[in-house]
Each structure stands twice: as C-alpha cells, then as structure tokens.
Amino acid sequence: GEGHAGPHNGERGDLIVVFKEISHSVYTRSGNDVIITCVISWPQAVLGDEVEVPTLSGKVSFKISPGTEHGKIYRLRGKGLPILNGHRFGDQLIQIHIDTPSSPDRTEKNLIKELYQLYSKKKNIKIKKFTP
C-alpha cells in the first residue's frame, strides 16, 4: 500500500520491483556471503604463504596456513554483501584450489622424484570416507 492512490480515490497500489542478478567473473553469491576460488601452488599449500585476494572493498592480504588442503575454505568476516536493514555485512569465503603442474620441467621433475622417494619410505597413504 505504498504506491499512488488508485482512480476515484481507490486504494493505494503496491510497487513490485523484480531484480535479475547476473553472474560475476570472480564472485559467486550465497545469501550475503561472496565466494571466490584462490588457486595456489603445491609448495604454497605445504609451507603456507601470504597472498593478496580481491574483496568487494579492495584487495587484502591473508595468510594461508601451512598444510592447507585442496578445497579448504577460509573466511574473511564482514567482507561480503550488506545485510538488509542492518549495519553488518556478510563474509567472503575463499576456497583453495591447489594447482598441479601438468608438464613440469626437468628440474621440477627431479625435485618431485626426490620428494616421492622420501614419502614412499613413510608409506603415507590414507583412505578417508568420501564427503560430497
């Protein structure tokens, strides 16, 4: 009932607005949260690193913990979309993807083979339950 009065002093009408949300090249929306994917190297995942990521309010640095696994999600609190009728913001979620080189050069292959030899001595294979 916030629209103009109807003809002949009729009731006020309703204003209906329909928004069409288009996809963004970097961000995916989930309610008031936004999600991005951050692709890092295997050494960054193992050793940890500090990387710069985009947010809706500009770039920020954040720390990747040593031992980060593929698919881990980090949360930047208050870096998402504004919450309607409030003074708070949603969060930005950062999903980690670990880049595996498809064609390592000779030096990389040799280093990986050395590392493989260290791991194969430990018999470090783990089987876990699948969770989608």
Image (cartoon, rainbow, N blue to C red):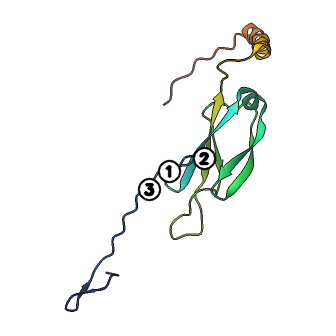
17 up-or-down from 117: above or below: below
> Dividing the picture into quarters, in which one does residue 66 lie?
top right
Identify the amino acid type marked 1: Ser
Give me the C-alpha separation between circle 2 and circle 1: 10 Å
Circles 2 and 1, Cβ within 8 Å, touching? The answer is yes
Above or below 51: residue 69: above
Rendered residue at 52%/50% (across/down): 24
Against 33, residue 98 (above or below) is above
Q: Residue at 74% of width from left, 16% of height from top?
A: 105
Q: Is residue 33 above or below residue 9?
A: above
**In the image, residue 9 lies at what x, y percent?**
22, 92
Of callouts 3 and 1, which one flags the residue occurring earlier in the amino acid sequence?
Answer: 3
> Sequence-wise, which precedes: disc 2 or disc 1?
1
Taking depth in this image into account, of 81 and 102 the one nearest to the observer is 102
Tell me the tag on residue 21: 3
Residue at the outermost bottom position = 9
- Reading the image, the residue beneath label 2 is 93
Tag 3: Cα neighbours inside 10 Å, few (<14), some, or many (≥20)? few
